[in-house]
Image (cartoon, rainbow, N blue to C red):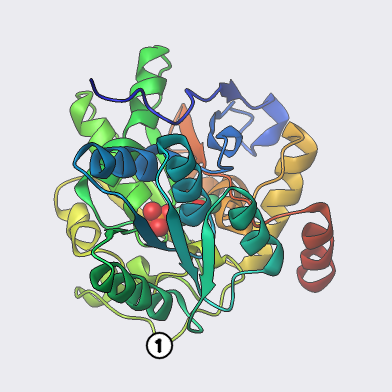
């Protein structure tokens, strides 16, 4: 028998009329309320379940944080040991949260790519299973459940706003739209300056590898998007936009006050579109914002970012 999904069917709420410039209410899909703190549990949980059903006895994953805690959560639920390789940029409290969920945490490399290469090597040498944080069809299949849930609630929406790192979430949203007969619903794909690998690639018409990640939104810090994600705009209407770190932080603060929920700047990026690209959003009557969440936030961190950027 297949396992029941590990993720929750999260709440879908509408903002108060004053939240957006247009006064139109926005749908918020509150994936910050997943037990792992972000949407990642949808896809990572799905992929880990599949691997365990197929005999995996040990799982390795590389992550800046949220895929790691999702894999740690999944491993604990499935009774399989998990090792997460994080880069040095992953904050100490995030490492502790992953460890407290029951995973081994290894620190390797200064950026995600180095941590990832190490996780792949370790898994190979130990004959263990390696789980990628954004580039796998089963991950996208898992992330797509967020659209299934919105559709099941009969909520009407005419665009989806999402943050983009390596693009797994974007791929999942497009898959969810497709399988629900909504291939005409555009997706607004948001990145921060200094982590905008999709935007740079679309401008150059080739898949770009950024020289470095300079944004504080480290959950968006994939230097290169997945090939499948680079190809998506040829199959689905996708609008790529960029916001600043300051925009993302301002959006986190506004969202915290309005909804009383803390989210990472990676998630603030999507929320920032409401103010920074208000003209773009006004083309739609019922935007749906994927509130992807993230554990890399606290009152103290928000306070420090506010000091620095606003
Ligand atoms: C992983 C993550 C993203 C980006 O997801 P991708 O699938 O890498 O595009 C955005 N926000 C948060 C909070 C994340 O954890």
Residue pictured at 59% horizontal, 22% vertical: 13
**Viewer-nearest residue: 94 or 51:** 51
Tag 1 residue? 211
- x then y, percent, for residue 267: 57, 51
**Viewer-nearest residue: 54 or 258:** 54
Tell whether 3 sits left or right of 112: left
Residue pictured at 46% horizontal, 27% vertical: 285
**Viewer-nearest residue: 117 or 173:** 117
Helix, strand or loop at mark 1: loop
**Viewer-nearest residue: 274 or 288:** 288
Residue 77 lies, with reference to residue 136, above or below; the image says: above
Question: Is residue 259 visible in this depiction of the protein?
Answer: yes
Indicate the quadrant where residue 178 lies.
top left
Figure quadrant of the C terminus: bottom right
Residue pictured at 23% horizontal, 53% vertical: 136
Residue 130 lies, with reference to residue 77, above or below; the image says: below
Residue pictured at 57% horizontal, 79% vertical: 88
Tell whether 12 sits left or right of 143: right
Question: Is residue 133 visible in this depiction of the protein?
Answer: no
Tell whether 215 sits left or right of 123: right
- x then y, percent, for residue 41: 44, 41
Tell whether 71 sits left or right of 264: left
Residue 157 lies, with reference to residue 32, above or below; the image says: above
Tell me if mark 1 has few (under 14), some (14-19) or many (20+) residues whose alpha carbon lies within 10 angstroms of its own: few
- x then y, percent, for residue 278: 55, 47
């Amino acid at each position: 028998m297949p396992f029941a999904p590990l993720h929750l069917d999260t709440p879908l709420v509408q903002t108060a009329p004053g939240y957006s410039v247009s006064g139109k209410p926005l749908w918020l899909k509150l994936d910050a309320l997943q037990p792992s703190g972000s949407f990642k549990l949808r896809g990572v949980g799905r992929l880990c379940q599949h691997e365990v059903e197929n005999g995996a006895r040990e799982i390795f994953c590389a992550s800046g944080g949220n895929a790691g805690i999702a894999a740690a959560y999944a491993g604990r639920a499935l009774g399989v040991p998990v090792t997460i390789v994080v880069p040095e940029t992953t904050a100490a409290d995030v490492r502790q949260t992953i460890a407290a969920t029951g995973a081994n945490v290894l620190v390797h490399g200064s950026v995600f790519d180095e941590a990832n290469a190490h996780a792949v090597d370790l898994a190979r040498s130990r004959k263990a299973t390696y789980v990628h944080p954004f580039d796998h069809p089963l991950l996208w299949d898992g992330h797509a459940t967020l659209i299934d849930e919105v559709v099941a609630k009969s909520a009407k929406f005419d665009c989806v706003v999402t943050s983009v790192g390596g693009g797994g979430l974007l791929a999942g949203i497009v898959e969810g739209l497709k399988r629900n007969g909504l291939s005409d619903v555009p997706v607004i794909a948001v990145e921060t300056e200094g982590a905008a690998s999709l935007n740079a690639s679309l401008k150059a018409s080739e898949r770009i590898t950024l020289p470095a990640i300079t944004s504080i939104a480290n959950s968006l810090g994939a230097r290169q998007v997945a090939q499948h994600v680079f190809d998506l705009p040829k199959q689905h209407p996708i609008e790529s936009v960029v916001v600043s770190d300051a925009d993302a932080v301002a959006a986190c603060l506004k969202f915290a006050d309005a909804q009383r929920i803390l989210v990472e700047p990676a998630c603030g990026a999507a929320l920032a579109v409401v103010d920074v690209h208000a003209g773009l959003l006004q083309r739609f009557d019922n935007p749906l914002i994927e509130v992807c969440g993230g554990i890399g936030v606290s009152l103290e961190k928000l306070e420090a970012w506010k000091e620095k950027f606003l």
